[in-house]
Amino acid sequence: MPNLVPPITTVKHCMDYKARLQELEPKVTFLMSLYLHPNISPETVIEAKKAGITGIKSYPHGVTTHSEHGVMSYEQFYPVFEEMERQNMVLNLHGELPPSAGKDITVLNAEEAFLPTLLDLHRRFPKLRIILEHCTSAAAIEAVKSCGATVAATITAHHMFLIVDDWAGDPHSFCKPVAKLPSDRRALLKTVVSGDPKFFFGTDSAPHPAETKRADRFAAGVFTQPHAVGYVLEALEQAVELGVLKAEDVTKAKLEGFLSRFGRDFYQLKDESGERTVLSKSTEAVQDILRSVDGTLEVVPFRRGKMVWTAVLK
Amino acid sequence: MPNLVPPITTVKHCMDYKARLQELEPKVTFLMSLYLHPNISPETVIEAKKAGITGIKSYPHGVTTHSEHGVMSYEQFYPVFEEMERQNMVLNLHGELPPSAGKDITVLNAEEAFLPTLLDLHRRFPKLRIILEHCTSAAAIEAVKSCGATVAATITAHHMFLIVDDWAGDPHSFCKPVAKLPSDRRALLKTVVSGDPKFFFGTDSAPHPAETKRADRFAAGVFTQPHAVGYVLEALEQAVELGVLKAEDVTKAKLEGFLSRFGRDFYQLKDESGERTVLSKSTEAVQDILRSVDGTLEVVPFRRGKMVWTAVLK
């Protein structure tokens, strides 16, 4: 995620950041991306590709955390996208129009209002691989389905649980794009088990300090990282219980596709580690709060106190 | 407001509460209401009328603060409504269906989904005076307009400012019914200056302690009481600046009607005090926080730190 302060807009900044991450977690394969910004030229794209950077992420202006530097119009970036297409890089989109785009744009329809822009980009750059990140609406799913194989979307664990009522009164369930209607959640759940390789898992997990959540103005973001895969299973189990999904829809092959294979294939990565994730229903509950080792930082995880499946790496 | 803990469901409780209020503010005319509850019988209605109680308020189950005792089906209360109609009492409705009413009921459509119930009650009890309290949607305004003169609605100050984006991230702008779309806000603003006596001011002001707002699960309610009338003027001025209203729509007569006369007339009260409210644009800002005299309670007022008109009683 390149939405740091300041945002990651140079190859050097990106590679320094990767080195810091790699030091913390030597075994993890980090796919790095730049923040789409007027600083970035076609030359930057060539340099980024050489350095092994995977993609460039676009944040619409003012839409999400630290996106003040985000873009509002894509026209100035057409030469960048052309070069990305040539270099076989991925364009990651936070697909929402900013509120300034029109007097009737709200957090509820900002994603749907962005979809014509997605379709237009795909038409102009049909070979450019595009991911509509953390999509939340039935409309977004239909739009992505209508595109060719170069357009995919990610779905988060928390959007498989949440609707607008959940973040009305709960800062820990508030994120951008906001969770929407029950019909949108049903569409997400059905897509997760559809076996369609255009849709795969992306957490968009955000560890905001608890004090920025219990505040007069609270931060957007849900923290799911410690139980990311477990939440997906929990959401699907609940969906079966509620009759939204049938038990036979939730197959091992479809889950493996959604959680691992479809994303890996879209990113054109090989399965080199040979590791497998084994899921089991734990009797443990999600922690009420997580503290940093030095005790200075507290983060409230998603679905604190509730039961969750456990994922074990084998 | 009878939604205390426990709710006010007996005439004695109501009159005790009135005495406590009257001791605090001897000059204010308090219009008392009971909380609609299975305890309340047609006999209660007769007793309430004799004691000078004005109305009965209904809170749908689970919809708003302390409404666990609220109603979900009105049929059991038809004898109560019949007696209220005979006794010329007012039925005050928190007009939202509870989430349990259907799998697609959310905070966004709960009011609109309640409107058929309002129309049904009006058809069954055409002489019963009904107020749809704190209405928030264009649909609610159209429904109230379509009824006879016995059905009215109140509009709050905060709903003249807020849309869904405002409470996404701000606990002090979160209330039930939630603020809705820009088109709904435009409909409310136009109705306020329409001169239609079916629509008048009601604050629904709720002084939740600041600590219950900066919380893992925050309370629903906006505190507008100290500047209630000033906010209305501020909202109308902004609406004129944004082109939602024309300056000539905001007349003294329409404002007097909305803020004072229409409500008084609907409640069949006379203007006995002879007092007048004079409004002037203050250069002062809304307080950042309000503290109780003993310092134990802090409340954050609506639009803290922003400029507001001042209302002076003459």
Image: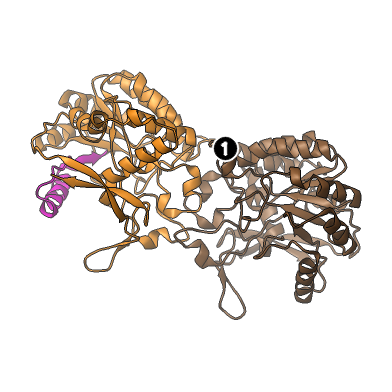
Chain colours: A orange, B brown
**Position in image of residue A71 (x %, y %):** 35, 37
For the image, the number of numbered tags is 1
Q: Is residue B12 above or below residue B72?
A: below
Question: Crowding at label 1, few (<14), some or many (≥20) Cα neighbours within 10 Å?
Answer: few
Subunit under mark 1: B
Is residue A26 toward the left or the right of residue B2 in the image?
left
Q: Is residue B268 left or right of residue A292?
A: right
- Amino acid type indicated by mark 1: Gly
Is residue B122 positioned above or below A77 on the image?
below
Q: Which residue in the structure is indicated by mark 1?
A: B102
Q: Position of residue B128 (x, y in %)?
A: 85, 45
B163 magenta-colored: no
User: Is residue B30 in sight in this rendering?
Assistant: yes
Report the residue at 62% width, 61% height from top. Answer: B223
Numbered disc 1: secondary structure: loop
Q: Which quadrant of the view contains residue A154? A: top left
Magenta span: A10-36
Q: Nearer the viewer, residue A39 or A252?
A: A252
Q: Position of residue B153 (x, y in %)?
A: 75, 45
The quadrant of the image that shows the C terminus of chain A is top left
Comparing A134 with A35, the one in front is: A134
Compare residues A234 and A67 and report the one nearer the observer.
Answer: A234
Residue B291: x percent and y percent?
58, 74
Which residue is rendered at x = 43% and y = 29% of the image?
A: A138
- A33 within the magenta span: yes
* Residue A166 placement, left or right of B161: left
Q: Residue furthest bottom?
A: B294
Q: Is residue B253 visible?
A: no
Which quarter shows the N terminus of chain A?
Answer: top left
